[in-house]
């Protein structure tokens, strides 16, 4: 059987995707590109930095939502721990806030998952060349939506409230007093134009602020 021909220097890619079938399909399709080699695959966000330190990828292809640590948070961690690795975020959810958070975390690209694999392969090459690649529809939506009105503390409190936690539970989780938590929740409810904390969580998630 003839040996597969690859260029002398392939683009080394780390792939982070929690759905096994999707991860396997992406790895297979990207591996068919002559100049791309998938050198690591992980299913959870908290495995990304550890795997990148071992595999030393040129580009990390991260799902925006992963168990353990989101791809958006992992992008920021990679910037600190593996600064030479370029990050490309893939998302199923075209939420404007996700794009802003990805760029703030140092990601070089942000694409929606329903595009062709050839477009993804070209995006990987582009970010390696130092370019920024952003889904144009999502970029327009992010510009019209404006920045998140939530402060980092308001985001922390809303994230802690996601599973219907009590004020006492939230206070313990974010290390704040219950009165301070109530103040942050009230502010977040006002900024999202909702009636209660769970509506505020849902509204913030729809916008990609959480």
Image (spheres, rainbow, N blue to C red):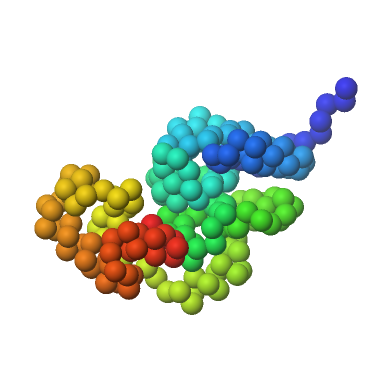
| Residue 24 or residue 182, whichever sits in front | 182
Tell me the residue at 58%/39% (across/down): 19
- Where, quadrant-wise, is the N terminus in this rendering? top right
Residue ID at (42%, 74%): 146
* Residue 161 in the image: above or below residue 7: below
Please state the horizontal and vertical placement of residue 194, each as a whole percent of the image.
Answer: 32, 70
In the picture, measured across the screen, residue 197 lies left or right of residue 23, that is left
Q: Position of residue 210 (x, y in %)?
A: 38, 57
Q: How far across and down, in percent of the image, does residue 101 sit?
A: 43, 59
Identify the residue at horizontal 23%, vertical 62% (top origin): 185
In this view of the protein, which residue sits in the foreground, 172 or 143? 172
Image coordinates for residue 100, horizontal then vertical, percent:
45, 64
Which quadrant would residue 156 be assigned to in this image?
bottom left
* Residue 130 visible, this orientation: no
Of all residues shown, which one is farthest toward the bottom? 144
Camera sees residue 207: yes
């Amino acid at each position: 059987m003839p040996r597969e021909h690859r260029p002398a220097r392939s683009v080394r890619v780390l792939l982070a995707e929690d759905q096994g079938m999707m991860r396997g399909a992406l790895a297979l399709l990207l591996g068919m590109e002559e100049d791309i080699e998938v050198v690591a695959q992980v299913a959870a966000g908290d495995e990304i930095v550890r795997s990148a330190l071992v595999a030393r990828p040129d580009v990390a292809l991260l799902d925006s939502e992963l168990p353990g640590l989101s791809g958006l948070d992992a992008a920021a961690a990679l910037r600190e721990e593996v600064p030479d690795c370029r990050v490309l975020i893939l998302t199923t959810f075209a939420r404007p806030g996700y794009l802003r958070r990805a760029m703030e975390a140092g990601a070089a690209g942000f694409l929606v998952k329903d595009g062709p694999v050839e477009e993804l392969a070209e995006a990987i090459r582009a970010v390696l060349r130092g370019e920024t690649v952003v889904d144009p529809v999502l970029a327009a939506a992010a510009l019209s939506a404006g920045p998140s009105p939530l402060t980092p503390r308001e985001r922390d409190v809303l994230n802690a409230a996601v599973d219907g936690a009590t004020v006492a539970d939230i206070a313990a989780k974010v290390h704040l007093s219950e009165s301070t938590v109530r103040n942050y929740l009230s502010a977040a409810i006002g900024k999202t134009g909702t009636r209660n904390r769970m509506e505020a969580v849902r509204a913030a998630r729809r916008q990609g602020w959480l």
